[in-house]
Image (tube, grey):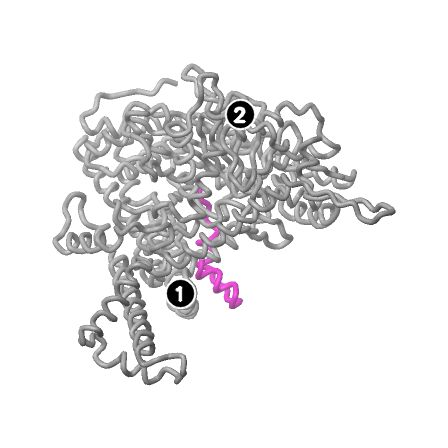
Amino acid sequence: MAEAHQAVAFQFTVTPEGFDLRLSREALKHIYLSGIAAWKKRLTRLKNTFLTGVYPATPSSWLVVVMTTVGSLYCKVDLSMGLISHIRQCLPSSRYLSFQNRTLLSATLFSTGVWISGILVFRQTLKLLLSYQGWMFEPHGKMSRGTKVWAAITKVMTGHKPMLYSFQSALPKLPVPSVQATIHRQYLESVRPLLDDAQFSKMEVLAQDFQNDTAPRLQKYLVLKSWWATNYVSDWWEEYIYLRGRGPLMVNSNYYAMAARAGNSVHAILLYRRRLDREEISPVKVLGLVPMCSSQMERMFNTTRIPGKETDILQHLVDSKHVAVYHRGRFYKLWLYYSGRLLGPRDLELQFQRILDDPSVPQPGEEKLAALTAGDRVPWAEARARFFGSGKNKVSLEAIERAAFFVVLDEEEHCYHRDQEDCLDRYAKSLLHGRCYDRWFDKSFTLIVYKNGKLGTNAEHAWADAPIIGHLWEFVLATDTFQLGYNEGGHCCGEPNLGLAPPQRLQWDISEECRMAIDGSYRVAQVLADDVDFHCFLFTNFGKGQIKRCRTSPDAFIQIALQLAHFHDKGRFCLTYEASMTRLFREGRTETVRSCTSESTAFVRSMADPAQSRCERLRLFKLAAEKHQLMYRLAMTGAGIDRHLFCLYLVSRYLGVESPFLAQVLSEPWRLSTSQTPQQQIRMFDLEKFSDYVSAGGGFGPVADDGYGVSYMMGGENLITFHISSKFSSPETDSRRFGRQVRQALLDIAGLFDAPPNKVPN
């Protein structure tokens, strides 16, 4: 083929007259342009590293300081108070340096020192400002004078065109809470509504013994680690919660996100990656003022989880120039650049169409190969070492693992239909696990494009949390719709380059023994996938707009509604997990908010008691909402308990210390695991004006076999999307039934605020 010949830079043959060398000018041109692009990228990274390191200063500010210092010397004003003269005397003598040049060099060195000192003072000042967290605990709309002064200074110091990582070194470290606060103020308080008097008394004794005997020694090691490490939790959390898990990633760890419109999405993702590489993305700020840690974004692209027998590792590459594509059981390598330039949307459409039009059939064992990433980790690690360590298998596997991300051209069709109640349920299950062999669950994320143009993503959890993928997803949807667009024929805009080499089909030599390993992983994954019960629905009766008018936190409102729904569903309360972020601290990830509190259970019981008045129920609801907000704020500001207890447990294991208290705490199941998906991290369009373009959010599998997983997203002022998961194998759970309970709970609570009574149909 002509394209194949263009890929060869030179050819030679041996003749009686000597070597016959033939050069391909076109190929050499592409090699040259690719090299130029690579060097530009290296220089950009070097420049960004420097600019981030000296923020908020700039090279021009350094030049101003130098010119001011030198100018003052010419005006016979010594701003250095003799330091320049001292530096001049310390410089080595040289016949090439005149007195004037030595003076100029001394002034430059002095100015540079002043400039660097100013940067360090600024960084320390900003770190002190960002360490202040009193603003989070002040009543909504009532800011103290001190906080107003703090906010004004912080806004000035963080508002000078920051790059993505400009604030990283100024973010404070995550503090280690005191053992007493963790055990008494929060842990015992959180389990009190779940235990009877005898059980609680027993737990109090265990807690007191731990605090007096074991905890002081463990706490010293944690404090020492907090001094030495950037974050005392994150590395252990990534390793022991994610990478050391030997069960399937599918359902248990990975999560998904929904969206629509596929044509330009890959190009939009690549535009995001380019902005990420250039650090042109502005840091996300709380209330537009306090910057959050951006470190999780570093591994969004070019990242793969590599299986191991005891623990996995995250392989992250600086760059990748291709994506891996799966379609009808076949794998492809699709180059993203041509002549050193990123392929445009129309070029990518052409390449994907070539894959769709390819009539070839899968090679033996190729179709279900990705099932290895869906099953248990140890068999996959063994198969990878045994069957993919050499030859064409190694080359093809590296093409997948070293890809920027993974793309699936799915033959199914999914979308939202108002008249089809289970359409989102099927959509969610497809994104979460697919057919168990058509997603590469080890990649940082897999883009799934359906036959009807709808799309979604499946993300691996170890490298980052859901808000990071959500940030990318919002950018992709907005860029696809409002910037790139489509022509009248429904194609991407522009003209395709028909001279592009087609995507490269990956080649495999999969033995019968390897196929048996694939089938084994597939069976494990299939059992897990078939057991997942999913229910997704859009709650449109009201949204956060009406909740705010009730002077209540929307998140607290929903969390209390979930407690009411769970009590109606099971007749009892359970330990509840709500994910909260700790990205106000450097390398922060998440903390747990224990949403089942004494206040929320008191409110729920009042709703079941017909003797309780509406005023009393409202009073109890407000107490529960205030307590939830306090718990959430404590978690965000580093005063949560579960990460602290987790790290204390790890230290005890390292030291070989047995703790009945920690063993009990770490064995307690989370039968209700919840998470809110953030919306509008990037304000690229008005949600109310373009409500049809709002993503439906995403979800995850249940944490406990007999529990529920609940993800929710507030899409604008009048929509709340819920994703509920459970397991068919549990006789205690039913996702659709729980969904009805959630709807009714929301309406019942809203009815307390003079809203008309509502009922949810069966």
Q: Position of residue 231 (x, y in %)?
A: 41, 60
Q: Where is residue 250 in the image (x, y as percent from the top left)?
A: 56, 39
Q: Position of residue 309 (x, y in %)?
A: 64, 53
**x 85%, y 45%: residue:** 15
Residue sitting at the far front:
17
**x 26%, y 80%: residue:** 83
Q: Which of marks 1 and 2 is nearer the N terminus?
A: 1
Is residue 706 shown above or below 197?
A: above
Q: Position of residue 443 (x, y in %)?
A: 56, 42
Residue 337 among those drawn in magenta: no
In this orientation, does residue 184 appear?
A: no
Nearer to us in this view, 21 or 753: 21
* Residue 361 picture quarter: top right
**x 30%, y 78%: residue:** 100
**x 69%, y 23%: residue:** 359
Tally the marks: 2
Q: What residue type is labelled 2?
A: Tyr
Select label 1 or label 2 by which is in front: 2
Is residue 411 shown above or below 127?
A: above
Q: Mark 2 falls on what kind of element?
A: loop
Nearer to us in this view, 359 or 584: 359
Q: Which amino acid does label 1 sit on?
A: Ser
Is residue 24 shown above or below 487?
A: below
Mark 1 residue crowding within 10 angstroms, few (<14) / some (14–19) / many (20+): some
* Residue underneath mark 1: 226
Q: Is residue 522 left or right of residue 429?
A: right
Nearer to us in this view, 567 or 759: 759
Q: What stretch is highlighted in magenta?
A: 647-672
Q: Name the mark on residue 653.
A: none
Residue sitting at the far left:
145
Mark 2 residue crowding within 10 angstroms, few (<14) / some (14–19) / many (20+): many
* Residue underneath mark 2: 450
